């Protein structure tokens, strides 16, 4: 990928770990990508096995000559096998070759299904011919891709008719037995950085928490956007792929709200885990970052970021966070300030997001009360990894005079990427938000109201917005790199002014 080409040596170990992933069925599974919590999201009892990215990583690492799941095209090229291909005995998902195969096509999508065996969808047909559920799959898939085109995205690249038609192929199969709602599989490179693909949806979406239609809508929005992504940059960082695909659910199936269950696992609930970590279910919860950007710059911001990440010939091919940073700079913004504003928004989601009244904010990392007995509080060498933040809640205590104020001083050990801000929560319901400007030495201060009769609390947010990486280090972060500023330290002092 352009300035940070991912070497085969980087991707192969990832693929080995992921390609054989097993999905454990669960009644609390999410309607996308086989995200299957074994308990309530946020409870700590969760498992993640993302089949889409496992297949993507295997595609990148192994190539057609090494994969276990390949089939031969009529032109002799080897491509990833589909459910309709003859089973090769490796235990992956294939239809029974004796089952009659059918398809229903629209202008953009073809739905492929069988009429017998456990892979068959519900066969009730109002017209006596085509199952109503298959028609519904086609309608929702067509709508999802049409909406993406309206938003400025390209359709997934052509597979040169491998599914039997020119349209994009979606297969229905009983993948729910493996705990999967759907997945998308890149199968052939069409040019540098771009790949064609197909998707597989569960054949009936029964046995999961959400009703079948709701699960289908969310799955189609999420998985079909993966197909679009593979046509932009199939090598892109996993956190970026998943966070934006989950954000797309908000654009196409907003009223389903399935993606809210992952917010406690992303930075809204766990701000001390790096935004660009590709591990765990936080990648789905971090759709909120792109919601923040779309509210600030418009929904087209995400498409423009993907344009900067485009891995095709002659394109910029920025990696994930570099594309985000470049976009913000193109809008005359400063990434550390914007990321700090995002961290601050998460401390007050009700006022920060369109649907924020339903979001549960994280508790402050530290809380203290300042009053007549304790007028000074400080912490030394507060450790904040890259693309994370920490919050400190200061509460006015007994003995304070009227019109008291508190002076907050922040000293970042390193200036690179450091940012800080405050939120003052008034008893009237008003919230005052201000940035703390740090000088060239990383030191800055802000004096705010601290009158116990009027102020509930003052929240200090310190953020490490560094985007400096050493790429290709076998990590799950942006460009598979490690941050040059993970050991960022902050000294924070709060002093009551009487």
Image: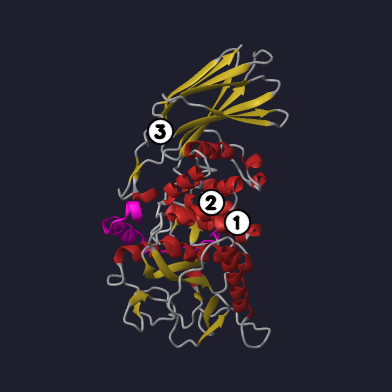
Q: CA distance from mark 1 to mark 2?
A: 9 Å
Q: Which mark is residue 287?
A: 2
Answer with the quarter of the image where residue 352 lies: top right
Please say if 193 is above or below 332. Answer: below
> Which residue is under mark 1?
250
Q: CA distance from mark 3 to mark 2?
A: 25 Å
Please tell me how many numbered marks the rendered image carries: 3
Q: Using the image as rendered, state which of residue 292 and residue 382 is in the foreground.
A: 292
Q: Using the image as rendered, state which of residue 324 and residue 10 is in the foreground.
A: 324
First to last magenta residue range: 1-30
The answer to whether one can see residue 39 in this image is no
> Which residue is under mark 3?
416
The answer to which of marks 1 and 3 sits earlier in the sequence is 1
Q: Using the image as rendered, state which of residue 331 and residue 398 is in the foreground.
A: 331
Query: Given contact means CB atoms under 8 Å apart, are the residues at marks 3 and 2 in contact?
Result: no
Q: CA distance from mark 1 to mark 3?
A: 33 Å
Q: At x 43% / y 70%, what residue is drawn?
A: 196
Q: Residue 235 at x, y = what percent?
A: 38, 59
The answer to which of marks 1 and 2 sits earlier in the sequence is 1
The answer to whether one can see residue 183 in this image is yes
């Amino acid at each position: 990928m352009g300035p940070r080409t991912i070497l085969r040596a980087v991707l192969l170990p990832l693929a080995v770990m992921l390609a054989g992933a097993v999905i454990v069925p669960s009644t609390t599974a999410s309607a996308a990508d086989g995200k299957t919590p074994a308990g309530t999201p946020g409870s700590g009892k969760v498992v993640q096995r993302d089949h889409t990215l496992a297949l993507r990583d295997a595609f990148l690492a192994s190539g057609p000559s090494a994969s276990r799941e390949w089939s031969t095209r009529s032109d002799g090229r080897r491509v990833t096998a589909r459910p309709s291909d003859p089973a090769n005995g490796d235990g992956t998902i294939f239809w029974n070759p004796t089952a009659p195969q059918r398809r229903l096509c629209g202008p953009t999508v073809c739905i492929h299904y069988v009429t017998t065996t456990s892979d068959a969808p519900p066969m009730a047909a109002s017209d006596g011919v085509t199952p109503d559920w298959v028609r519904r799959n086609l309608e929702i898939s067509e709508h999802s891709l049409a909406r993406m085109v309206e938003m400025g995205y390209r359709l997934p690249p052509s597979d040169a008719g491998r599914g039997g038609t020119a349209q994009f192929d979606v297969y229905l199969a009983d993948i729910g037995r493996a705990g999967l709602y759907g997945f998308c599989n890149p199968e052939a490179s069409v040019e540098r950085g771009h790949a064609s693909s197909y998707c597989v949806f569960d054949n009936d979406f029964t046995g999961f928490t959400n009703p079948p239609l709701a699960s289908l809508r969310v799955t189609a929005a999420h998985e079909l956007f993966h197909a679009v992504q593979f046509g932009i940059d199939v090598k892109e960082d996993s956190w970026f792929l998943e966070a934006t695909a989950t954000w797309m659910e908000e654009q196409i199936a907003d009223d389903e709200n399935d993606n809210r269950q992952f917010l406690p696992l992303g930075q809204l609930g766990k701000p001390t885990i790096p935004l660009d970590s590709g591990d765990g279910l936080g990648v789905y919860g971090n759709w909120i970052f792109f919601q923040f950007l779309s509210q600030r710059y418009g929904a087209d911001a995400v498409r423009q970021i993907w344009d900067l990440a485009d891995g095709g010939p002659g394109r910029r091919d920025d990696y994930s966070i570099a594309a985000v940073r470049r976009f913000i700079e193109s809008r005359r913004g400063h990434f550390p300030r914007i990321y700090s504003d995002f961290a601050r928004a998460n401390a007050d989601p009700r006022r920060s997001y369109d649907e924020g009244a339903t979001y549960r904010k994280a508790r402050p990392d530290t809380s203290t009360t300042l009053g007549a007995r304790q007028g000074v509080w400080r912490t030394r060498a507060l450790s904040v990894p890259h693309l994370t933040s920490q919050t400190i809640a200061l509460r006015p205590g007994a003995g304070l005079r009227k019109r008291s104020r508190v002076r907050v001083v922040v000293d970042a050990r390193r200036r690179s990427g450091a940012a800080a801000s405050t939120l003052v929560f008034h008893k009237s319901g008003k919230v005052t938000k201000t940035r703390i400007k740090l000088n060239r030495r990383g030191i800055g201060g802000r004096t705010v109201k601290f009158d116990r009769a009027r102020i509930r609390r003052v929240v200090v947010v310190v953020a490490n917005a560094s985007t400096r990486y050493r790429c290709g280090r076998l990590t799950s972060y942006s460009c598979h790199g490690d941050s040059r500023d993970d050991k960022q330290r902050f000294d924070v002092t709060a002093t009551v002014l009487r």
